Amino acid sequence: MKYPKYKILLAILDFLVIQISFLAAMQVRGVSLVHSGNWMHYVLSAEFYFFFFYSGIMIYIFQNKKLYDINVMLTRSRQLVLLSSSCLYAVLGLAIAAFFVRSSWILDSRLTVILFGLFSFTVLAVYRLFVFRPLYKTLKHLRRLRKNVLIVGTGQIAKRLVIEMELDAIYGLNLLGFVDDAQPVGKKIFEKYTVVGKVNDAARLVHDLNIQEIIVTSCEINHEELLRIVDVCKETDAQVRIISSLFDVVHQKAYSESYYDIPVANVRNPRESRIQIFTKRIVDFFAAFFGILILSIPFLVIAGMIKLTSRGPVLYLQSRIGKDGKKFNFYKFRSMYIGSDTDHERVTKVTEYIKQKNNKNNGSMKIVNENNITPIGKNLRKMSLDELPQLFNVLKGDMSLVGPRPCLPYEFDAYDNWHKRRLSVLPGCTGLWQVTSRSEVSFDDMVLLDLYYINNMSPWLDLQLILKTVPVMIFGRGGG
């Protein structure tokens, strides 16, 4: 996914400020890490590598707190509140890290950690609010950082966006026209702005007009048509954003930004490099391998409990649909009595659930007869411990650590065509839907969350979802 230059610059500046704050805190405590101006001495020291790593953790915290969202970055009070809470988390984390590593140069006294927190928060707040923010706004108003934009759609949302752009140039959006299949080319939509082409003209328009961003605002259409429009726009070199009521679940449950308080969902270019795919597979393989080694004792304990409390095998093998519709054997710890997988009532209910629109069934896809679940199985399912053997699926290459959940054959048969888009990547052990919603959204919304993940898939997003999966498993939210 393409990140705007201002986000990259802001993250680099934050990183440098955090590094300098570490050094300043140590200096005040009388520990000089740079001897006689010799920076190489510091670069080759253990302190440098620790601070470098921890600075990266702080950038992750800032990202998670949405401190790089344009709508947050341009505020004062909200940015200050989020910055203060982020620095507080960072200080607490540093104190805990120092305690475990028993490092005298980090935690020579509590004052060192407190000084770091004060220095980092003060400098970050001053340069973000009184240097970077005003400079960004000035350059936007002077059109130095403006980006050429096309709007797909000519409805009320599109017109509202244009009005906001005319009143305030803070986001640097320079509209060059509308794209709409239902309107003739040349038709005036709002003041000087006209329809400049059809959806299928997007690639040509991006090239001819030097477009940096396409904003899809089409709302009075179905999912299939909206996704077709997005597909066409994704094939261009422009950043694609979506403003549509169909994507409300993404704004409510997942990471999203906004223009003028209008939520927008980002979509990355689909030209995923082979290196990224290879890297994801390598990370999956080694993470699954070491995960199996670390969890070997819990695996044996769970296996013993299953064997002692009910008749049947420890593992349950199930046929699932994976990438591109291919079947594979899906591994789970058995949590139900033998023969429960032939529950025809469940098949009927799940099929109806998929077909019904906006049906927020509290059980989501986990429509199960409770009488079929073993006593130990209830606890395993609640904390998702029955899912742990899927690490073997990851090791084999059937699954990834992060991705859409694999579906059952009869579920696949009930899918609409646009639902099947979620099978364009390897299924995962965890994903955006599991972390943000699990049993709280309709099936269509679940698919939209999966598609949002696919359209924004990156190592950074995978890391965030893996870290967020742990508390979901511990507290058993949505499990069962």
Image: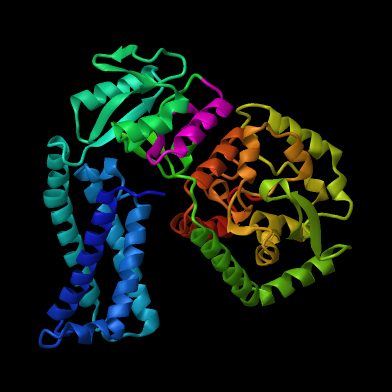
Q: Quadrant of residue 329?
A: bottom right
Q: Quadrant of residue 50?
A: bottom left
Counting from the top left corner in percent of width and height, residue 386 is at 70, 60
Relative to 408, does residue 122 appear above or below in the rendering? below
In-front residue for pair 199/224? 199
Counting from the top left corner in percent of width and height, residue 92 is at 33, 68
Residue 261 in view (yes/no)? no
Over which residues does the magenta segment extend? 221-248
| Residue appearing at x 50%, y 62% in the figure | 275
Residue 364 in view (yes/no)? yes
| Residue appearing at x 64%, y 50% in the figure | 479
In-front residue for pair 91/198? 198
In-front residue for pair 47/229? 229
Numbered disc total: 0
Relative to 204, does residue 41 appear above or below in the rendering? below
Counting from the top left corner in percent of width and height, residue 214 is at 37, 33
Q: How is the image coloured?
A: rainbow
Query: Is residue 48 rendered to the left or right of residue 435?
Result: left
In-front residue for pair 382/261? 261
| Residue appearing at x 28%, y 40% in the figure | 71
Counting from the top left corner in percent of width and height, residue 223 is at 56, 28
Relative to 187, does residue 302 appear above or below in the rendering? below
| Residue appearing at x 24%, y 77% in the figure | 110
- Does residue 467 show up magenta in the picture? no
Query: Is residue 131 rendered to the left or right of residue 296?
Result: left
Q: Quadrant of residue 304?
A: bottom right
Query: Is residue 306 rendered to the left or right of residue 397?
Result: right
Relative to 287, does residue 406 appear above or below in the rendering? above
Query: Is residue 129 rendered to the left or right of residue 397?
Result: left
